[in-house]
């Protein structure tokens, strides 16, 4: 075993034992969530804390009790041109090796220079059966992007558990809502060299969550980060929801919920839910 006996590995073992009867993809994500606590604590205590602005589904999960898991951590960075990714990686590696005592953590920077993969080859160490075709690695991704626009507000949130206490700077809820709409409207993938629309069920779940909570959207900020006016954004959003394939939504959402029946029902009813709550943002 390459990990010393410590709270990190023992806690992951306990999490696995409590969830080992669940979907393996869900298990991997719930293990990732525990590791995310370490990452957030590191960032909150680092010299980069003032420049990082937390966003995305994980932000909603940690600070607003979003009822789904999330697989990565998303941050915007103020003055990203001066951000030293190499120094950040070195300090992150030192934190896990020296403080958390994870001697074989692997950190890889993607070609885009904005995505980090923090990999932990631990599944067999915590007792999880891994077939030859599966990876023994749990990885958590950190995505960073430049902070765009000026019409947003940041707030400080505190998270305290038995094992962790930290403060993180994040976008306000209206700005987080704007960011989610922007993701739905602009998310793309590549098929060879050709761009194509990318559908994530979690985006549509989060959209309905915002609407159901009655969160007011920051239209000025949305325009700054997408270039779309309110009327154009609403039309594009309606078209996206209308065309959303329930099967694709379900496939993406399944690893983030325990209840597959709920996921299936939600995926089939996204359009109706959107129409029912639309008055929230119109």
Image (tube, rainbow, N blue to C red):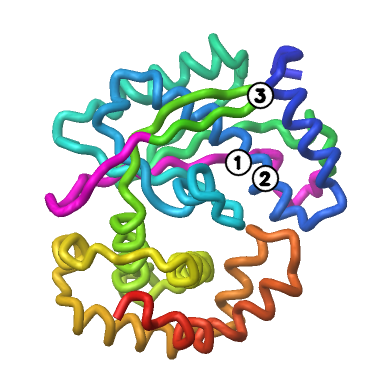
For label 1, the residue is: 33
Residue at 61% across, 57% down: 67
**Can you give x and y, in whole percent of width and height, for residue 122 in the image?**
71, 31
Q: Residue furthest top?
A: 98
First-in-chain label (3 vs 2): 2
| 154 sits to left or right of 66 | left
- Front-most of residues 67 and 88: 67
Of circles 3 and 2, which is in front? Answer: 3
Residue at 55% across, 55% down: 66
Instruction: Look at the picture and state if 222 lies above or below 101.
Output: below
**Can you give x and y, in whole percent of width and height, for residue 246 in the image?**
58, 83
- Front-most of residues 66 and 107: 66
| 257 sits to left or right of 62 | right
For label 2, the residue is: 30
**Can you give x and y, in whole percent of width and height, for residue 108 in the image?**
44, 34
- Front-most of residues 102 and 229: 229
| 92 sits to left or right of 79 | right
SS for callout 2 = helix
| 89 sits to left or right of 32 | left
Assign the C terminus to one quadrant of the image: bottom left
- Crowd band around label 1 with a 10 angstrom C-alpha radius: few (<14), some (14–19), many (20+): many
Instruction: Look at the picture and state if 127 lies above or below 47.
Output: below
Q: Report if the CB atoms under discs 1 and 2 are less than 8 Å apart.
A: yes
SS for callout 3 = loop
Q: CA distance from mark 1 to mark 2?
A: 5 Å
First-in-chain label (3 vs 1): 1
Q: Report if the CB atoms under discs 3 and 2 are less than 8 Å apart.
A: no
For label 3, the residue is: 162
**Can you give x and y, in whole percent of width and height, for residue 113 in the image?**
30, 41
Question: In the image, which residues are magenta?
Answer: 130-156
């Amino acid at each position: 075993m390459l990990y010393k006996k410590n709270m990190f590995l023992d806690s992951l073992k306990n999490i696995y034992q409590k969830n080992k009867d669940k979907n393996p993809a869900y298990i991997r994500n719930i293990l990732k969530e525990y590791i995310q606590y370490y990452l957030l604590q590191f960032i909150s205590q680092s010299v980069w804390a003032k420049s990082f602005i937390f966003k995305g589904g994980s932000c909603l999960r940690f600070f607003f009790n979003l009822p789904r898991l999330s697989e990565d951590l998303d941050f915007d960075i103020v003055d990203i041109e001066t951000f030293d990714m190499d120094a950040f990686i070195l300090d992150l590696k030192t934190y896990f090796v020296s403080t958390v005592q994870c001697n074989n953590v692997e950190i890889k920077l993607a070609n885009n220079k904005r995505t980090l993969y923090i990999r932990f080859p631990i599944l067999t160490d915590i007792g999880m059966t891994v077939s030859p075709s599966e990876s023994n690695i749990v990885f958590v991704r950190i995505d960073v992007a430049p902070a765009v626009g000026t019409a947003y507000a940041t707030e400080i949130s505190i998270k305290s558990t038995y094992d962790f206490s930290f403060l993180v700077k994040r976008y306000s809820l209206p700005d987080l809502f704007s960011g989610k709409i922007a993701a739905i409207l602009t998310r793309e993938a590549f098929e060879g060299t050709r761009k194509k629309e990318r559908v994530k069920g979690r985006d549509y779940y989060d959209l309905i969550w915002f609407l159901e909570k009655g969160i007011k959207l920051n239209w000025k900020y949305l325009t700054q980060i997408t270039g779309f006016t309110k009327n154009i954004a609403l039309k594009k959003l309606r078209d996206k929801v209308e065309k959303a394939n329930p099967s694709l939504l379900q496939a993406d959402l399944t690893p983030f919920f325990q209840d597959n029946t709920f996921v299936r029902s939600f995926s089939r009813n996204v359009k109706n839910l959107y129409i029912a709550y639309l008055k929230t943002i119109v």
